Amino acid sequence: MAALIDHILDSELSETKAKSYRNGFTAALVTGFSVLSYQYWSVGELSVEMMAVFFSTAFVFVLSQYVYQQE
């Protein structure tokens, strides 16, 4: 894992681009939460596929925050 983090931090990813990715993940999380909330409200159950997309996006978001805090 440390080698992967070092590779990411040594890449040409600028601070502006990193913030753009973070904002994109934030928008995806808010959208996913909204869709899951509406689906639960209208149908009464949650789709496993939508939950997988939401939680995988959340995982990548949290992981990216951890990686960029290491800088």
Image: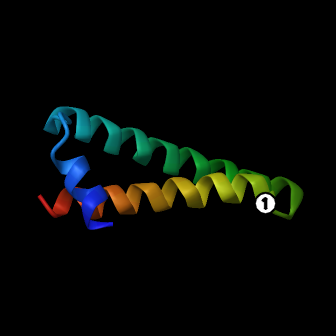
**Can you see residue 37?**
no
Q: Residue at x 30, y 57 (%)?
A: 4
Q: Is the C terminus in the top left, top right, bottom left or bottom right quadrant?
A: bottom left
Give the left or right position of residue 52, taking residue 67 as reference: right
Mark 1 — residue?
48
Q: Residue at x 79, y 60 (%)?
A: 48
Give the left or right position of residue 59, taking residue 1 as reference: right
Q: Is the N terminus in the top left, top right, bottom left or bottom right quadrant?
A: bottom left
View extreme (front): residue: 3
Residue 43, horizontal then vertical, whole percent: 88, 56
Q: What kind of element bears circle 1?
A: helix
Q: Which quadrant holds residue 14?
A: top left
Give the left or right position of residue 27, taking residue 55 as reference: left
Q: Residue at x 34, y 39 (%)?
A: 21
Between 24 and 8, the one nearer to me in the picture: 8
Give the left or right position of residue 31, taking residue 23 as reference: right
25 shown above or below 52: above
View extreme (left): residue: 71
Amino acid identity at mark 1? Val
Mark 1 surroundings within 10 Å by alpha-carbon count, few (fewer than 14), some (14 through 19), many (20 or more): few
Residue 54, horizontal then vertical, whole percent: 60, 55
View extreme (right): residue: 43
Q: Which quadrant holds residue 62?
A: bottom left
53 shown above or below 13: below
Between 65 and 31, the one nearer to me in the picture: 65
Q: Residue at x 48, y 62 (%)?
A: 59
Total tally of numbered discs in the picture: 1
